[in-house]
Image (spheres, rainbow, N blue to C red):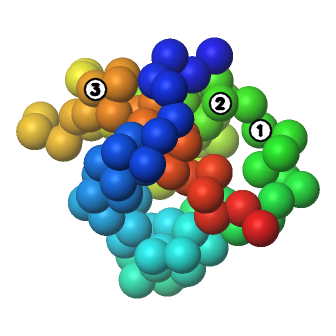
Amino acid sequence: KNSVPNSQEVIDAAKEIYKEKCKKCHGANGDGKGTGAKGMKPAPSDYTKKAEMDKRTDGELFYVIMQGSPNPDTEMSGYKAGKAKPGKEISDEDAWKLVHYIRTFAK
């Protein structure tokens, strides 16, 4: 369960984290078509598909943000300390904020 209450302040903070950490691959619109996604197979997740996003729990999204994708064929390695490159880690709180922001893309 997401431990960070959702608010506009949380969304605004997460938007900045997303720009820094996620936008390159997942795209400015969350559609998985960022400049860094070219040639990736499988492609980064498309967060704009509401039906698919509704199936994903907050915990699952948090896990992938922090631990990386369970699919070994992806390039999503995670942002938890020890997983991410030094200096690229994010806190649990920031990951929960990102979950809220990622959900704003679903239509």
Dot 3 or dot 2: first in sequence order is 2
Q: Residue at x 33, y 33 (%)?
A: 94
Residue type indicated by callout 1: Arg
Query: In screen coordinates, is 89 left or right of 92?
Result: left
Q: Which residue is mark 1?
A: 56
Q: Is residue 9 above or below residue 35?
A: above
Q: Residue furthest left?
A: 87
Q: Quadrant of residue 63?
A: top right
Badge 1 crowding class, 10 Å Cα cut-off, few under 14, some 14 to 19, many 20 or more, is: few
Instruction: State the residue in front, 75 or 53.
Output: 53
**Marking on residue 42:** none
The residue nearer to you, when weighing 63 against 53, is 53
Query: How far across and how far down the image is residue 68, in percent?
Result: 49, 36
Mark 3: secondary structure: loop
The image's mark for residue 58 is 2
Residue 91 circle label: 3
Question: Does the residue at mark 3 contact the one at mark 1 (Cβ under 8 Å)?
Answer: no
User: Where, by quadrant of the figure, is residue 45 drawn?
Assistant: bottom right
At a point 50% along the width and 67% down the height, the residue shown is 26
